[in-house]
Image: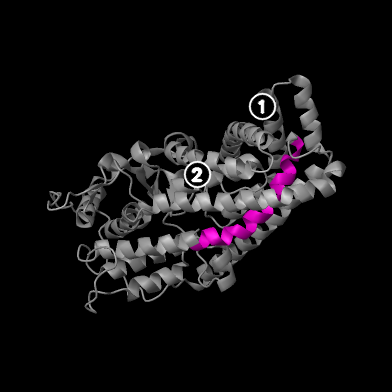
Amino acid sequence: MKRLQLSLAMLGLLLFPFLLAPAKTAAFSQTGSTPGATAQTPAGQQAEPPPPAASSSQEPQKQPPVKSYTLTPEKYEKAVAFSRAHYRLYFIQFVYGLLVVLLVLRWKLAPKYRDWAEKVSSRRFLQAVIFAPILLLTLDVLGLPIDLYSHWLSLKYEISIQSWPSWFWDWTKGELISFVVGIFLLYLLYGVIRRSPRRWWFYFWLVTLPLVLFAVFIAPLVIDPLFNKFEPLEKTQPQLVLALEQMLHRAGVVIPRERMFLMKASEKTKALNAYVTGFGSSKRMVVYDTTIANMTLPENVFVLGHETGHYVLNHLYKGIAFTAVVLFVLFYLSYRGIGKLLTRYGPAWGIRDINDWASLPALLLLLSIVGFFVAPIGNTFGRHVEHEADIYGLEVTHGLTPNSSQVAAHSFQILGEVDLADPDPSEFIKFWLYDHPPVAERVRFALDYDPWSKGEAPKFVK
């Protein structure tokens, strides 16, 4: 999720984003159906169509047709500069994070915190309550310069409009959440290690699977409202809701109005986005108010048709399964390396053995390195499901929206202009960093995808 980005500097914030990653499935930005959330129409029956959508002030005006993703010379230079700055920051952040962990190991801070915890209590849980927050706070404070620069960069290029006091308050809330999650995971991890020194990685992986499901369920109810304001979409956008119901009728699914939410992103950012999140009673579709403000009614319908694709194509469940595989690889490879690392450097770092609380930074070091090289695989998966959702959005709005391919292409054009999307990222950058197809590719596909004129069957919406 964007508000709690993947941090490989600490165990709590390592697993926390992995647990929450499926909670926001394939957001409509640059960077799955669940029972009770999306009810399929029973076979042999037809859903009652909703009334026609009323006219809207957001109806499309005469616009020149989109032929490709293009930017004015000024915005082109700005988008390239902003994108390249973020590319550099990504790799700098990884190296800087490793340096932070190595300094913590060299300075023997974890053994000092362990000793404090053991002096206070002999009870393992109380030791975790003392040790985890101090170590997590140390790592985060040392890593704060990168976070500050990242926000400064977004302010400089006018993507973010969040004030520094507001940003620091969000940072503080993130810290408090990481303390709670970190204490629990730390206690759980080292309890498993003590009971099974050879298979701890497998048993801990098994334990994380229900935690993934719990995190996906609880995030939209508890975590998201701590950082942003939400309201029912129909409260301020009744015309959009009516248009969405027509699109959903075409899709043959029902997403109740109470599952559609508007997020007041404009209080902090100019970026455009939409996403699906949660499952069961917590599942919902969310659209930024910035997206609604910058796009016409048909364009918003396409964006949310894209999100409907995530419901229908079960991307939530696929994301959870993919996360489980990623965690399995991370834990196994870390297990294979931690013994050798502690044998060679453990005494110099003041670490007794793998059972020692103080071994956590060494484990984080391995998880950071493995996670860095696993990340492109996750991004490849993200691009795949995003492309499927793009196809679904095009198909479900075909015939409902005049010139639907132009509507979709213009939606991507606006997305790129506002979010300063790189007009031509390299293949390496795309492979390593992009969890969505580049905007230029999405525009091109929207203009070219036309199975109907070729006498071919659509892929998803028949």
Residue for badge 2: 20
User: Where are the magenta residues, as a range?
Assistant: 358-380
Q: Main secondary structure of the magenta part?
A: helix
**Quadrant (top left/top right/bottom left/bottom right) for the C terminus:** bottom left
Regarding residue 276, the answer to whether it shows in the image is yes
- Answer with mark 2 or mark 1, whichever residue precedes in sequence: 2
Residue for badge 1: 129
Q: Residue 308 at x, y = what percent?
A: 31, 54
> How busy is the neighbourhood of tag 1: few (under 14 within 10 Å), some, or many (20 plus)?
some
Residue 359 within the segment the image draws in magenta: yes
Indicate the quadrant where residue 451 lies.
bottom left
Q: Secondary structure at mark 1?
A: helix
Q: Is residue 161 left or right of residue 194?
A: left
Residue 303 within the segment the image draws in magenta: no
Q: Residue at x 36, y 54 (%)?
A: 310
**Which amino acid type is shown beneath numbered disc 2?**
Leu
Looking at the picture, tell me which residue is in the foreground, 299 or 450: 450
